Image: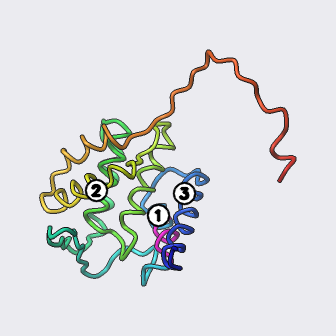
């Protein structure tokens, strides 16, 4: 049976996904704040606000802990703007932003959830698929994230994610399958 806290996390993730899908504005740090406000609503002392104090991340499995530097908001603005203007694929930008945000712990809580949704907003907005690591690969992924936190080098993590965690949709337009014959708006 799920605890109330875990149920809240699931419900807030649902609201976060709904926001990501419905928000038509281009990704920005303000949108990142909005996503965190939703996903960390019941976990954080100050959801949706950038971190102002120190934080420690337990890496698990005797890997120690990670203590990111104090957050420098202007550095985050510069990082975000430079990344968005970089001549690289949307998928690379999304992974870079996601892992940067996870490691730097921009918010008081919900950083991993926020970073995943932020990256997926960028992917969805540009038709690049989704970043979704399958459950049976989460242990490997979390181990690679821990190594990245300690080293600061995300190349191995991004390479692994590209192979194991990027999902797209391939349409076979040659199939002539039947279509529904109702208007879904008639049932709202």
Residue 96's tag is none
Camera-nearest label, 2 or 3: 2
Residue 100 place in picture, x, y as percent = 27, 57
The residue indicated by pointer 2 is 139
The image's colouring method is rainbow
Q: Which residue is drawn at 30% across and 62% down?
A: 102
Q: Which of 128 and 173 is in front in this view?
A: 173
Label 3 packing within 10 angstroms: few (<14), some (14-19), many (20+): some
Q: Picture coordinates of residue 31 (x, y %)?
A: 48, 61
- Which residue occupies the foreground of this view, 25 or 42? 42
**Residue 115 picture location, percent across and down:** 38, 59
Q: Which of 39 and 178 is in front in this view?
A: 178
Residue stretch rendered in magenta on the structure: 35-41
Give the vertical position of 27 relative to 59 (above or below).
above
Q: Check residue 17 in the rendering and tell me which mark sits there, or answer none.
A: 3
Furthest residue to the top? 174
Query: Please, is residue 27 above or below residue 41 in the view?
Result: above
Residue 163 figure quarter: top left
Would residue 180 be visible to someone looking at this image?
yes
Labels 2 & 1 near each other (Cβ < 8 A): no
CA gap, disc 2 to disc 3?
23 Å
């Amino acid at each position: 049976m799920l605890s109330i806290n875990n149920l809240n996390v699931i419900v807030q993730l649902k609201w976060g996904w709904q926001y990501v899908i419905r928000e038509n504005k281009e990704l920005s740090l303000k949108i990142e704040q909005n996503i965190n406000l939703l996903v960390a609503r019941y976990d954080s002392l100050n959801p949706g606000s950038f971190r102002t104090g120190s934080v420690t991340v337990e890496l698990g499995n005797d890997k120690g802990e990670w203590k990111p530097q104090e957050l420098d908001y202007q550095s985050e603005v510069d990082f975000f703007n430079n990344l968005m203007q970089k001549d690289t694929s949307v998928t690379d930008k999304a992974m870079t932003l996601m892992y940067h945000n996870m490691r730097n712990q921009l918010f008081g809580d919900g950083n991993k959830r926020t970073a995943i949704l932020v990256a997926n907003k960028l992917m969805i907005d540009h038709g690049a698929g989704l970043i979704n690591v399958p459950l049976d690969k989460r242990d490997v992924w979390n181990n690679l994230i821990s190594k990245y936190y300690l080293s600061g080098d995300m190349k191995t993590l991004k390479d692994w994610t590209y192979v194991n965690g990027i999902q797209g949709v391939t349409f076979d337009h040659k199939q002539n399958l039947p279509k529904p014959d109702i208007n879904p708006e008639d049932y709202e």
